[in-house]
Image (cartoon, coloured by chain):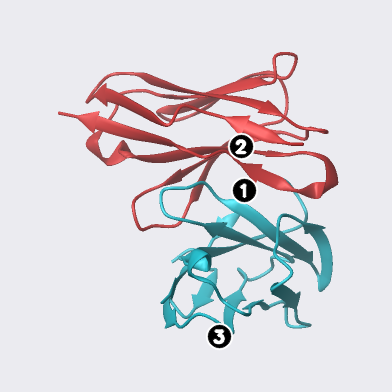
Chain colours: A cyan, B red
Amino acid sequence: DSGVTQTPKHLITATGQRVTLRCSPRSGDLSVYWYQQSLDQGLQFLIQYYNGEERAKGNILERFSAQQFPDLHSELNLSSLELGDSALYFCASSVATQDYGYTFGSGTRLTVV
Amino acid sequence: GQSLEQPSEVTAVEGAIVQINCTYQTSGFYGLSWYQQHDGGAPTFLSYNALDGLEETGRFSSFLSRSDSYGYLLLQELQMKDSASYFCAVRGGGFKTIFGAGTRLFVKA
């Protein structure tokens, strides 16, 4: 157990639907990062939050949004889902805003049918 | 833009040494890190280089040359459990940490 908790582990939903992925960072970590990993692909950076504020944004689609709450947990909302959104979504956390040493959760596998 | 390049696949024999290269192109640079990911698992942090030179952590070492925008991960005394994907990652401008596409390492008996 890495200390980063992601729920749910698996999600199957239909095209056009909306889902919410949840992440609780490791205790003491203030930064949360979201990454998307499609089949046999690398990790695509989506967005980073630090202590409730958006810190950096990657190639995140307009249909996707995220936020970090006062208790530091984060949610990634995916709407108008398409088949191509099927992927593993990882959340990672770190103490501050450093560029290394991220602790990853076990991921949410999203399947859009 | 920002990009990282690493080989897609490397195969080596148990007990051997293997080197996984990573070249990067970023608008800024804060350091090069490496992560390991087993099939179906989460990436785990292996090492980090902010300055030129070699960093050693047990059987794993990582090297960085900032002037060449190049680094590598060296795995010694390969074990079957080292079969996994290895990603290099760089934080460039805009506080974005970008990962390479990953190198799949196959360790053969």
Badge 1 and badge 3 in a common chain: yes
Q: Mark 1 points at which residue?
A: A101
Q: In the image, what residue occupies the spot 73% across and 19% down?
A: B66
Q: Is residue B84 above or below residue B32?
A: below
- CA gap, disc 2 to disc 1? 8 Å
Residue in the foreground of this view, choosing between A62 and B13: A62
Please indicate whether residue B57 sits to the left or right of residue B30 in the image: left
Please tell me whether mark 2 sits on a helix, a strand or a loop.
strand
Rate crowding at label 1 as few (under 14), some (14 to 19) or many (20 or more) other CA atoms within 10 Å: some
Please tell me whether mark 1 sits on a helix, a strand or a loop.
loop
Please tell me whether mark 3 sits on a helix, a strand or a loop.
loop
Badge 3 and badge 2 in a common chain: no
Q: Position of residue A40 (x, y in %)?
A: 41, 48
Q: In the image, what residue occupies the spot 48% across and 51% down?
A: B43
Q: In the image, what residue occupies the spot 83% across and 60% down?
A: A55
Disc 2 marks which amino acid?
Ser
Residue in the foreground of this view, choosing between B34 and A95: B34
Rate crowding at label 2 as few (under 14), some (14 to 19) or many (20 or more) other CA atoms within 10 Å: many
Disc 3 marks which amino acid?
Gln
Disc 1 marks which amino acid?
Gly
Q: Are marks 2 and 1 in contact (CB under 8 Å)?
A: yes
The answer to whether residue A40 is seen in the rendering is: yes
Q: Do the residues labelled 1 and 3 touch (CB within 8 Å)?
A: no
Badge 2 and badge 1 in a common chain: no
Rate crowding at label 3 as few (under 14), some (14 to 19) or many (20 or more) other CA atoms within 10 Å: few
Mark 3 belongs to chain:
A
Q: Name the residue under label 3.
A: A17
Q: Position of residue B99 (x, y in %)?
A: 60, 43
Residue in the foreground of this view, choosing between B10 and A50: B10
What numbered label is drawn on residue B33? 2
